[in-house]
Amino acid sequence: MAAAITLTAELGKRQVVIQTYMERDAPIQDFHRLLDKLNETVDRQQAKFQLEAEQLQLEHEEKELKRLIEQHDSIEANARAEFAGRGKRGEFKLTSQQEGQKNQAVANINRLKEHIPWRKAGIAKLEAIVGVPLDDTY
């Protein structure tokens, strides 16, 4: 008599169902090996799916960091040009709104500079899972 084994996994919008059979009276170690093999397969597929999403998010964050740095650098230059264009006299000083923009840009830049290495480390872990060939000794 055979025992049915079914493993179901969610991969984003997909659902994967793995079904197999095994002799009911097989040694318990055989069941463990088979379940370990199936779970390793599912873990790799989940990591593969997640890896793509993480890489896209990293790309987005790196572009956003570049944009924020450019924005930060342009705030004062634009304000100086506006100040000179209006023919104002006296010492140049950023307005409170411009100071706020600059401070917000710095906060966002710092947040991304802290977060990007964390995301890269997560990607490296996923790549290690995806890149490791399955051990066929089960």
Image: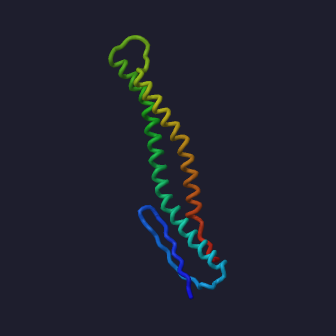
Where residue 52 sits in the image (x, y, percent)?
Answer: 47, 58
In-image side of 66 versus 36 (left or right): left
* Front residue of this view, candidates 35 and 80: 35
* Front residue of this view, candidates 32 and 53: 32
Where residue 126 sits in the image (x, y, percent)?
Answer: 56, 58
Q: Please tell me which residue is depicted at 36% across the width and 18% down the height of the picture.
A: 84
Q: Tell me if residue 119 comes above or below residue 75 in the rendering.
A: below
Residue that protrudes farthest toward the top in the picture? 90
Question: How many circles with numbers are drawn on the protein?
Answer: 0
Q: Quadrant of the N terminus?
A: bottom right
Q: Tell me if residue 63 comes above or below residue 25 in the rendering.
A: above
Residue that protrudes farthest toward the left in the picture? 86
Where residue 69 sits in the image (x, y, percent)?
Answer: 47, 35
Q: Quadrant of the C terminus?
A: bottom right
Q: Quadrant of residue 25?
A: bottom right
Q: Please tell me which residue is depicted at 54% across the width and 44% down the height of the picture.
A: 115
* Front residue of this view, candidates 118 and 35: 35
Q: Please tell me which residue is depicted at 44% across the width and 13% down the height of the picture.
A: 91
Where residue 132 sits in the image (x, y, percent)?
Answer: 60, 66
Q: Tell me if residue 128 comes above or below residue 115 in the rendering.
A: below
